[in-house]
């Protein structure tokens, strides 16, 4: 999702599950530049939106906690 503030645009983190979530990427002059910024910063495209790196790390930590349950 693109957020607009003071005639600038940023991509919002889709899930915001990490306490250290970026919430939104850097504000840019255009929506296209905002999307390019998150891609350059390696945010994960989910098919519906972008996930910041801190939230992606949280997802991976959560998955690592589930794995032992699957093997039992």
Image (cartoon, helix red, strand yellow):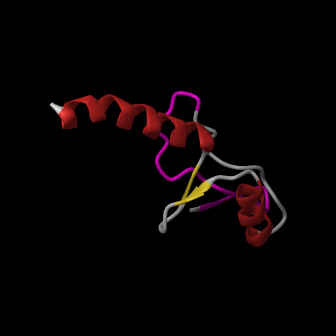
Q: Position of residue 43 (x, y in %)?
A: 64, 52
Q: Is residue 55 above or below residue 6?
A: above
Name the residue: 26% across, 29% down.
Answer: 68
Whether residue 23 is visible here, answered yes or no, is no
Name the residue: 76% across, 72% down.
Answer: 32
**Nearest to the observer: residue 70 or residue 30:** 70
**Nearest to the observer: residue 58 or residue 72:** 72
Q: Quadrant of the C terminus?
A: top left
**In the figure, residue 70 lies in which quadrant?**
top left
Name the residue: 79% across, 60% down.
Answer: 8
Q: Tell me if 19 is positioned left or right of 42 in this view.
A: left
Q: Position of residue 17 (x, y in %)?
A: 45, 37
Determine if the magenta segment contains residue 35. no
How many labels were placed on the picture? 0
**In the figure, residue 37 lies in which quadrant?**
bottom right
Name the residue: 65% across, 47% down.
Answer: 24
Determine if the magenta segment contains residue 5. yes
Magenta span of residues: 2-20
Residue lying farthest to the left in this orientation: 72
Q: Is residue 19 above or below residue 33?
A: above
Q: Tell me if 17 is positioned left or right of 52 in this view.
A: left
Q: Position of residue 11 (x, y in %)?
A: 65, 57
Q: Quadrant of the N terminus?
A: bottom right
Whether residue 11 is visible here, answered yes or no, is yes
Residue lying farthest to the right in this orientation: 29
Q: Tell me if 15 is positioned left or right of 40 in this view.
A: left
**Nearest to the observer: residue 43 or residue 72:** 72
């Amino acid at each position: 999702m693109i957020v607009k503030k003071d005639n600038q645009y940023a991509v919002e983190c889709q899930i915001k599950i990490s306490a250290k979530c970026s919430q939104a990427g850097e504000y840019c002059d255009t929506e296209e530049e905002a999307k390019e910024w998150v891609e350059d910063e390696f945010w994960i495209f989910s098919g519906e939106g972008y996930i910041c790196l801190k939230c992606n790390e949280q997802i991976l930590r959560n998955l690592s906690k589930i794995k032992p349950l699957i093997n039992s």
